[in-house]
Amino acid sequence: MTTKAWTFTHRGAPSSVLTLTTTHPAPAFPPPLPLPRAAAQPEEWVLVRPSHAALNPAGLFHMALVPRLFRAATAVPELDFTGTVADVWAPSAPSPPSSSSPSPPPPRFRPGDAVVASLPVAFLWPQGQGALQGLVACPARYCLRRPPGVPPAQAAGLPVAGCTAAQMVEDAGLGRGHRVLVYGASGGVGSLALQLARLAVGEEGTVVAVCSGRNMEMVKGLGADEVSVSVLCFPGCHPFGFCPKPLHRCWTTSTTSLCLPNCVGALATRPSTWSSTAWGYRAFTSTAGTS
């Protein structure tokens, strides 16, 4: 059985290494033994027909930088997707079951269920079976039912970017009335972090956003109080001259590390937090300032 898929075999930019094929081998289902190391214990698996997939910086990292030693020779990239369950498999109960053995749990999913899924790197890289294909087989615990009110295209973009943004907001400990800056506010993580920050600081707080000029109106619509056009940062420069009041929190979702040292200068002298993300994942959180 074959399926349509975007595949790559060597490293490089997506435009130069990705190939669309209609004869990619479909994932075996039920999953063959031995099971992948990332999901070594028998558990429920699902076979999903993706309808939408997210393109994250982690996928670019997979294609451009990861050597074959750490990935499948022929690989399908990307982690996040939405789709419909085509089949379900669960390991059989011991036969014959003893009277004291608990009944196996009912399956989490059934064919036809709408799901949103995110494949961990530890599962995707060795298997090479990512989201950009017609069928994906994975453990059911990587999936959630998609709420009926959430469009599939929007749901596909939430797992990696949304979890990263939510973790940044949680780590920052934002409170009502705080001022927070989001650098890279029009990107996947930044746009979600901006909206979560807006909810956390309330109407009495202030969300300052930095983005490209073409996205300023969109960022204002997401809840930013102050918006500025991003500038190229170099060590020693201060890109936050537009922000005269001190900040309680500062987040940069830009993948360039040159901007990071400049964030500290925009923070209030009281204890403040700045966070950074890299390749779509939270890289670190640091506290600056003294009481």
Image (cartoon, rainbow, N blue to C red):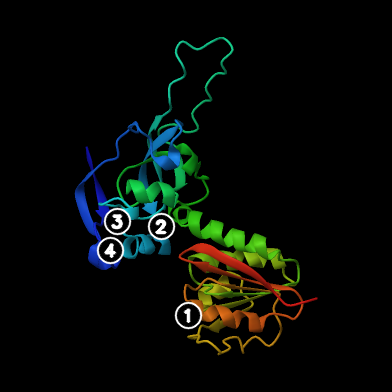
Q: Residue furthest front?
A: 69
Q: Amino acid at mark 1?
A: Ser
Q: Label 3 to label 2, Cα distance in Å?
A: 23 Å
Q: Earlier in the sequence, mark 3 or mark 4?
A: 4
Mark 3 crowd level (few <14, some 14–19, many ≥20, 10 Å Cα): some
> Helix, strand or loop at disc 3?
helix
Earlier residue among tags 3 and 2: 2
Rendered location of residue 284, percent (x, y): 58, 66
In the foreground, 75 or 136: 75
Alpha-carbon span between mark 2 and mark 4: 20 Å
Residue under circle 1?
212
Q: Which residue is mark 3?
A: 68
- Where residue 21 sits: x, y (%)? 20, 52
Query: Label 1: few (<14), some or many (≥20) within 10 Å?
Result: some
Amino acid type for the residue under numbered disc 2 = Ala
* Quarter of the view holding residue 285: bottom right
Q: Quadrant of residue 248?
A: bottom right
In the depicted structure, whether residue 224 falls above or below residue 96: below
| Gap in angstroms between the C-alphas marked 2 and 1 | 21 Å
Mark 4 belongs to which amino acid? Answer: Arg
Amino acid on which disc 3 is placed: Arg
**Disc 3 vs disc 2: which is toward the camera?**
3
Considering only vertical position in the picture, is 284 above or below 291? above
Mark yes or no: residue 102 visible.
Answer: yes
Which image quarter holds the C terminus? Answer: bottom right
- What residue appears at the point 53 percent right and 45 percent down from the top-left corner? 147
- Compare marks 2 and 1 and give the one earlier in the sequence: 2
Label 3–label 2 contact, CB within 8 A = no
Q: Which residue, given by chain and number where applicable, does mark 4 sit on?
A: 11
